[in-house]
Image (cartoon, rainbow, N blue to C red):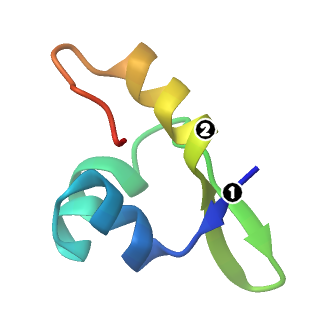
Amino acid sequence: MQLVTRAKMAQELKVSVNTFDKHYRYKKGFPTIMQGSREKYDLDKVQRWLDVNSLNYGGIR
């Protein structure tokens, strides 16, 4: 499991942080893990979520 920050997740998706928030972060079921009060994202879980919830998405790697 590789946990990344919001900024790193946006970078992995090749979008701005604002675009990540608008189009991914708040979508139903988007995989988020809380470390204390900080939100983190598991790259593998996000990839699986994208595979199920995206039509023509090329992946984050």
At label 2, which amino acid type do we have?
Answer: Asp
Above or below: residue 51 compared with residue 20: above
The answer to the question of whether label 1 and label 2 lie on touching residues, with beta carbons closer than 8 A, is yes
User: Which residue is rendered at x = 75% and y = 86% of the image?
Assistant: 37
Circle 2: is it few (<14), some (14-19), or many (20+) Cα within 10 Å? Answer: some
**In the foreground, 25 or 14:** 14
Q: Residue at x 31, y 32 (%)?
A: 59
Task: Please tell me in which quadrant of the rendered image residue 19 appears.
Answer: bottom left
Secondary structure at badge 1 equals: loop
Give the camera-side residue of 59 and 29.
59
Q: Residue at x 52, y 40 (%)?
A: 46
From the viewer's side, name the closer residue of 27 and 14.
14
User: Is disc 2 placed on a helix, strand or loop?
Assistant: helix
Q: Earlier in the sequence, mark 1 or mark 2?
A: 1
Query: Is residue 4 shown left or right of residue 28?
Result: right
Q: Residue drawn 68% across and 82% down? A: 38
Measured as percent of width and height from the top left, residue 32 is found at 63, 55
Mark 1–mark 2 distance (CA, rounded to whole Å)? 8 Å
Q: Residue furthest front?
A: 61
Considering only vertical position in the picture, is 24 above or below 6?
above
The residue where tag 2 is placed is 44
Which is more toward the observer, 50 or 11? 11
Which quadrant holds residue 26? bottom left
Residue topped by disc 1: 2
In the rendered image, residue 45, in percent from the top left (x then y), is placed at: 62, 37
Outermost residue, right side? 36
Q: Is residue 55 above or below residue 48?
A: above
User: Which residue type carries mark 1?
Assistant: Gln
Q: Residues within 10 Å of mark 1 (few under 14, many from 20)?
A: few
